[in-house]
Amino acid sequence: MKVHQGGAVYKNIALDVANKIVLGDFKIDEKISGRSTLASMYNVSPETIRRAIALLEEMNVVSSTRGSGIEILSMSAAEKFIEKYKDTEYVSTVKENIFKLIEKKKQLDDEIQLNFEKILDFIDRFKNITPFTLIEIEITKECKVIDKNINEVRFWQATGATIVAYRRGEEIVISPGPNYKFKSGDIIVVIGSSNVYDSVYNYIYNSFCEE
């Protein structure tokens, strides 16, 4: 097929749409609202999208009908389209994106490792101190202190325990301070006397009530 001069943008859009079909982002028999939707998604003109869709239609990857949107027809046709039209420039772009993602993952892994080392160091400094105990408690949606901060619930006064860290998803925060708000899914790390778990759990799940 003849590739028109300056066609790299619409060809790469067509390749990206085909990739989304193969990956399942666009499902077979699913309809995309129309060219304007894709034009907005890729931040290009409707004419660029028209040319991209025309390429896909030639290999029966999609079917476009005015007023009816763009229908996804075939995953195998999408695979053949990718094989036919992929080029060095496109592969190079994908390769560059992969390297960027790998670098971001490495940075995230390093950050997580650093935070774990901080909390492990914190635990090591307290593990031999008696009569204190360091434990973890999960905050679930049943917890009565959800969306309240430590000061509001008079946490230390009621439990005799101190929150020394919390984990929220992949983030670990050491010494969160009195403005920390309890959120469902958090894991709090608290230090207190030997019965600290029962004291904290019973308070935040059973005993706490608003004044």
Image (cartoon, grey):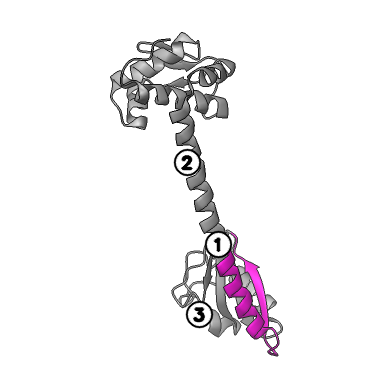
Is 76 or 97 nearer to us in this picture?
97
Across and down, in percent, residue 44 comes to 30, 28
- Is residue 47 placed above or below 135 in the rendered structure? above
Q: Amino acid at mark 1?
A: Asp
Label 1 sits on residue: 110
Answer few, some or many: residues within 10 Å of disc 2's Cα (few below 14, many 20 plus, some between 14 and 19): few
Q: Residue at x 52, y 62 (%)?
A: 183
Q: Residue at x 64, y 79 (%)?
A: 123
Q: Amino acid at mark 3?
A: Arg
Q: SS class of the residue under badge 2?
A: helix
* Quadrant of res 161: bottom right
Across and down, in percent, residue 129 comes to 68, 89
Residue 90 - label: none
- Is residue 113 placed above or below 48 in the rendered structure? below
Across and down, in percent, residue 154 comes to 50, 80
Q: Amino acid at mark 2?
A: Asn
Q: Choose the circle earlier in sequence order: 3 or 2.
A: 2
Is residue 106 located in the magenta-colored stretch of the structure? no
Label 2 sits on residue: 97
Q: CA distance from mark 1 to mark 2?
A: 20 Å
Label 3 sits on residue: 154
Magenta range = 112-140
Q: How many marks?
A: 3
Q: Residue at x 29, y 18 (%)?
A: 47
Whether residue 52 appears in this view of the structure is: yes
The mark closer to the camera, 1 or 3, is 1
